[in-house]
Image (cartoon, coloured by chain):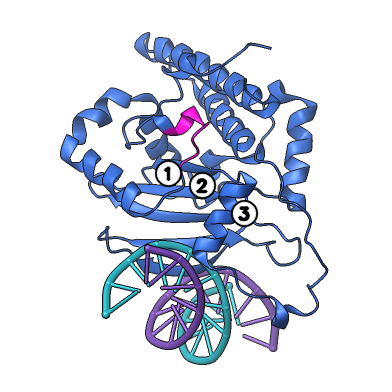
Chain colours: A blue, B purple, C cyan
Amino acid sequence: MLSNDDQKAVAALLRGQGCANHLKSLIEKGYVPTESLVDTILDSFSLALSFMISSVPPPPPPQHESSSSQDHVPKKSPKLKKKICEREGLKQYRDDCLYPLVNDGFSWRKYGQKRIKTSPYQRSYYRCAYAGEKNCNASKRVQQIQDSPSVHRTTYVGKHICEEVRTYSHQLNDDVSSGSKMIRFDKIDQDMSELVMPQLVSIDHHQETIEDEVKDQIMNQECDNNELVVDDDQFWTYPFSPGNCMFLDDISVLDYIPS
DNA sequence: CCCATTTGACCGGC
DNA sequence: GCCGGTCAAATGGG
């Protein structure tokens, strides 16, 4: 059984699927003005992502007030943080795209960059810009996983609890179908929008461009990197290769109950 | 001068 | 000792 947010995410994805199919038919007929449809599709995906990210339960309140005496706060080790994530059910959302999503609707602050042994590309570490003042524990990692075409993997960890997200969520809950401009991936810039869109709609094309060897390498890399896999999330049971966006055609296998 | 980014150092687990 | 993740001083742009 999906949560309320998950159901909204699925509904948004289905809306995007319908618009994509409509767009496809229009393109086949040579109909040119399809910008509004593209906007709707992008909004749908953005909306779905927002629900998936924001559906993670919030962390428990701090045991004691210690913000004024950070010197006495022991630093959480990565392993410890991972265990905490597992215990608290913090999910990771992973997204592959042709270019890193610089503007995904949230304010991030880069705090590190490292070369990973299992990848020739560097991995960038970001945390919510409001991590300090609003105790927002959301973070993300961005890493290029493939060249030609350039594919970047963004792994979101934790949930935004900052005011920015609460405002967004409030708007979304008020009217999911209104097409509110929550996370506008298409506002990165026009050129990027044109580059990202084909990835979403031309699955077969990209699958042909990625050899199985590369995909195996990517999957093995995930294992090597100790990515947290959420067992009860069927989202993760699907391979996230750059050319395989499972959202659309495979959505029926999810425990989806139409509202 | 402020602030975000960069980058080498550091930490803890294995 | 290696590794990924984080810290924090240095740096650079506006």
**Mark 1 — residue?**
A192
Which percent across, then down, holds residue A63? 79, 62
Amino acid type shown at disc 1: Met
Please identify the residue farthest to the right as the structure is shown: A65
Q: Which residues are magenta?
A: A229-236
Residue A61 position in % (x across, y down): 79, 55
Which amino acid type is shown beneath numbered disc 2?
A: Ile
Between discs 2 and 3, the one toward the N terminus: 3
Residue placed under numbered mark 3 in the picture: A138
- Find out whether the residues at labels 2 and 1 contact each other: C-beta distance under 8 Å: yes
- Chain of the residue under label 2: A
- Same-chain check, marks 2 and 3: yes
Quarter-wise, where is residue A176 in the image? top right
**In the rendering, at what x and y percent does residue A187 appear?**
55, 43
Q: Which residue is mark 2?
A: A188
Which chain letter matches label 3? A
Question: Toward the viewer: A173 or A92?
Answer: A92
Residue A259 belongs to the span the image colors magenta? no
* Secondary structure of residue under mark 1: helix
Q: Residue at x 36, y 43 (%)?
A: A98
- Toward the viewer: A115 or A66? A66
Q: Answer few, some or many: residues within 10 Å of disc 3's Cα (few below 14, many 20 plus, some between 14 and 19).
A: many
Is the same chain shared between marks 2 and 1?
yes
Q: Chain of mark 1?
A: A
Task: State the predominant SS element of the stretch in magenta.
Answer: loop
Q: Nearer the viewer, mark 1 or mark 3?
A: 3
Note whether A82 is above or below A112 in the view shown: above
Quarter of the rendering occupied by the N terminus of chain A: top right
Residue A65 placement (x, y as % from top left): 83, 69
Q: How many marks?
A: 3
> In the depicted view, which residue is nearer to us: A152 or A254?
A254
Indicate yes or no whether the magenta region holds residue A235.
Answer: yes
